[in-house]
Image (spheres, rainbow, N blue to C red):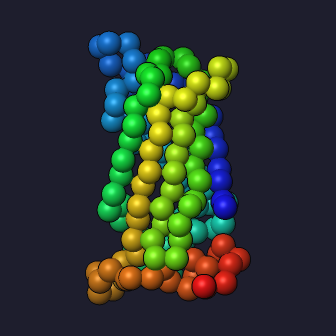
Amino acid sequence: MKQASLIIDVPFFDVDAMHVVWHGHYIKYIEMARSELLRTFNYDYPDMEANGHLWPIVDLRLKYVASATYGQHIRVTATLVEWEHRLKMNYEIRCVESNELLTKATSVQVAVCKETREMLFESPDIVFEKLGVERS
């Protein structure tokens, strides 16, 4: 299982009038972790496109457990859990100091042929090559 993490110092401009991170910014945080994870096996968005595929998000789910606040150090971890037919990633956002769980999320992406805009029902061979796994 591939995994990547990054630490973010919550910036002031991500905090809302209630002094907590506005809910939409968590999506930005998990996108940053997703890109970090994709880079670990050299298949980030430019690589996807260069190989003739687009990978739109088709499902995104978040569960807010506790709020992040200005200046808090948060660790965003992305874990690749499926890749045969789609890219499914699970995420956790935790406070670095306390390890308190703040948010859990899941995203699903599907491969689309860049030229025809048709969805593929299996991940392209390049995904398996980049991951170093055999197609089952």
Is 102 placed above or below 78 here?
A: above
Q: Quadrant of the C terminus?
A: bottom right
Q: Position of residue 78 (x, y in %)?
A: 57, 49
- Residue sitting at x 48%, y 79%: 123
Furthest toward the right, the residue is 132
Q: Is residue 52 above or below residue 48?
A: below
What quarter of the picture does the N terminus occupy?
bottom right
**Picture quarter containing residue 112?**
bottom left
Residue 58 shows in the view: yes
Residue 3, given in percent of the width and then of the height, sits at 65, 54
On the image, the x and y values in percent for residue 25 come to 38, 34
Residue located 32% across and 80% down the image? 119
Q: Position of residue 49 (x, y in %)?
A: 45, 74
Quadrant of res 113? bottom left
Residue 13 shows in the view: no
Q: How many marks?
A: 0
Q: Nearer the viewer, residue 15 or 111?
A: 111
Q: Is residue 127 left or right of residue 15?
A: right
